[in-house]
């Protein structure tokens, strides 16, 4: 009887301990465990990273410098970079860009510093509703000795401490956002401020939904008052793997009466540039959608080049909701962003990489291409009403809609017109 009694007593201890813990402490434990599991199971994957870079002199407004587009690979807790469509990977993005500001470590470095081990001190702040969704906010700090957060400027490098906040879903424990700023910045770096914000969402990669960064906002201020800002979007994420088959025998001949196998769609590169693709939604997108929800459409007209049909009308288009913010201004307003990632025909899968040009007219709804300038920081007016919003900038394959209504629905059949883009290195607005 004694062994059974001992086992029961030991098993009961965690349950009793959980009952004694304050709710916010228990929730923090579950958030940390959830994020750590997400990091441990993060697959090798690639995304397109679009960086819109800005600079301002002291006392002036931000002005756009350029837009840089990378392909980023996360593999084995490392981040590697290359130009989209190329295969030579480097661990330093400045191998490709030799001036301006860039950042890395956005996939996992900061998450591990906050949620793994005992590097951070975390304190519950309260429940908040950023972008209209309830989230638990916790504040954290990481000492310079424990942070591993390194800043490099030219030939000078230094490690800094950090202090900030994170927000997580109180029911699913998914991380939503991190904001932090550097502290104890070495004086030789000449920075007075370094701030970072990263938004996370679950993204379909292969057969799984994984937690990945969706957007990031990096900014620095120099001692002389000049500043730099990078607005970053991660899109077109997919699993990354290599496969090699070695054989010394010829493949067996199929039997004469064997049924012919139907070829499966094969992933291909993006379409040639400067082609217009009209996409019609096959199901509505409403204010009840959630970020990450599947969005389905179809190609509304043949996509042709030099008389050849590259994509037939009716081909299936797949995407997701990547942004849905509800701004409670008394009248109701929304920012909706839809990302289309691929077109599937009966024989192949084509990666979708394009810029939104226009959309069907709909009362109270305006698309970015029709209403907002590229890389805009200003507020937007829709039907004469001002809508405050965080920075919005053009991202290939992502269409942004500004909606001045209490509720909305982009109906089935709603059309958007896109123009395909080449994989480019950088572009000046």
Image (cartoon, rainbow, N blue to C red):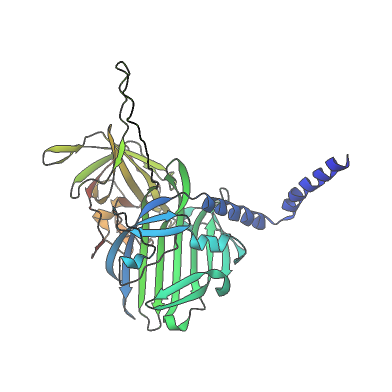
Quadrant into which the C terminus falls:
bottom left
Instruction: Give the camera-side residue of 239 and 64.
Output: 239
Residue 315 at x, y percent in the picture: 27, 35
| Residue 411, quarter of picture | top left
Residue lying furthest top: 257
Residue 352 location (% of width, % of height)? 28, 46
Q: Residue furthest left?
A: 306
Could you tell me which residue is drawn at 59 percent across and 66 percent down? 120
Residue 405 lies left or right of residue 360; in this view the side is right
Which residue ends up furthest to the front in the rendered image? 248
Give coordinates of residue 199: x percent, y percent: 45, 58
Q: Is the magenta stretch mostly helix, strand or loop?
A: loop
Q: Residue at x 40, y 83 (%)?
A: 223
Rendered residue at 41%/50% (across/down): 45
Q: Quadrant of residue 283?
A: top left
Number of labels in the image equals 0
Q: Position of residue 28 (x, y in %)?
A: 62, 57
Confirm whether the magenta stretch covers residue 374.
no
On the rendered image, what quadrant is the N terminus found in? top right
Q: Is residue 62 visible?
A: no
187 left or right, relative to 313:
right
Q: Give the range drawn in magenta.
A: 99-107
Q: Which residue lies furthest to the right in this view?
A: 1
Residue 205 in sight from this viewpoint: yes
């Amino acid at each position: 009887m004694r062994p059974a009694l001992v086992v029961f007593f030991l098993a009961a201890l965690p349950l009793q301990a959980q009952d004694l813990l304050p709710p916010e402490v228990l929730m923090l434990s579950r958030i940390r465990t959830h994020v750590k599991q997400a990091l441990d199971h993060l697959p090798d994957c690639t995304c397109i990273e679009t960086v819109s870079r800005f600079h301002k002199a002291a006392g002036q407004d931000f002005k756009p410098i350029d837009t840089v587009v990378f392909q980023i690979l996360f593999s084995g807790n490392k981040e590697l970079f290359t130009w989209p469509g190329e295969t030579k990977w480097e661990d330093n993005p400045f191998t490709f860009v030799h001036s301006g500001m860039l950042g890395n470590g956005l996939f996992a470095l900061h998450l591990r510093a906050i949620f793994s081990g005992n590097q951070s001190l975390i304190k519950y702040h309260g429940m908040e509703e950023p972008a209209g969704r309830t989230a638990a906010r916790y504040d954290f700090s990481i000492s310079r000795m424990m942070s591993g957060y390194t800043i490099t400027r030219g030939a000078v490098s230094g490690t800094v401490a950090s202090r900030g906040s994170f927000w997580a879903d109180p029911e699913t424990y998914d991380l939503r956002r991190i904001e932090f700023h550097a502290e104890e910045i070495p004086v030789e770096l000449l920075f007075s401020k370094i701030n970072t914000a990263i938004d996370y969402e679950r993204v379909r990669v292969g057969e799984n939904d994984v937690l990945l960064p969706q957007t990031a906002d990096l900014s620095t201020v120099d001692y002389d008052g000049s500043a730099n800002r990078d607005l970053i979007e991660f899109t077109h994420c997919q699993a990354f793997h290599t496969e090699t088959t070695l054989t010394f025998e010829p493949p067996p001949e199929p039997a004469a009466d064997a049924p012919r196998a139907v070829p499966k769609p094969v992933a291909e590169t993006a379409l040639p540039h400067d082609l217009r693709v009209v996409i019609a939604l096959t199901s509505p997108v409403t204010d009840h959608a959630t970020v990450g929800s599947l969005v389905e459409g179809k190609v509304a007209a043949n996509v042709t080049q030099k008389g050849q049909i590259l994509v037939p009308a009716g081909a299936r288009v797949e995407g997701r909701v990547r942004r849905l913010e509800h701004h409670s201004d008394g009248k109701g307003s929304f920012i909706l962003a839809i990302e289309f990632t691929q077109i599937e025909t009966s024989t192949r899968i084509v990666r979708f990489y394009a810029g939104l040009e226009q959309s069907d007219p709909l009362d109270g709804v305006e698309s970015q291409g029709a209403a907002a300038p590229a890389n805009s920081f200003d507020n937007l007016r829709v039907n004469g009403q001002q809508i405050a919003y965080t920075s919005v900038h053009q991202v290939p394959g992502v269409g942004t809609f500004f909606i001045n209504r209490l509720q909305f629905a982009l109906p089935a059949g709603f059309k958007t017109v896109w123009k395909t883009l080449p994989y480019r290195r950088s572009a000046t607005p």
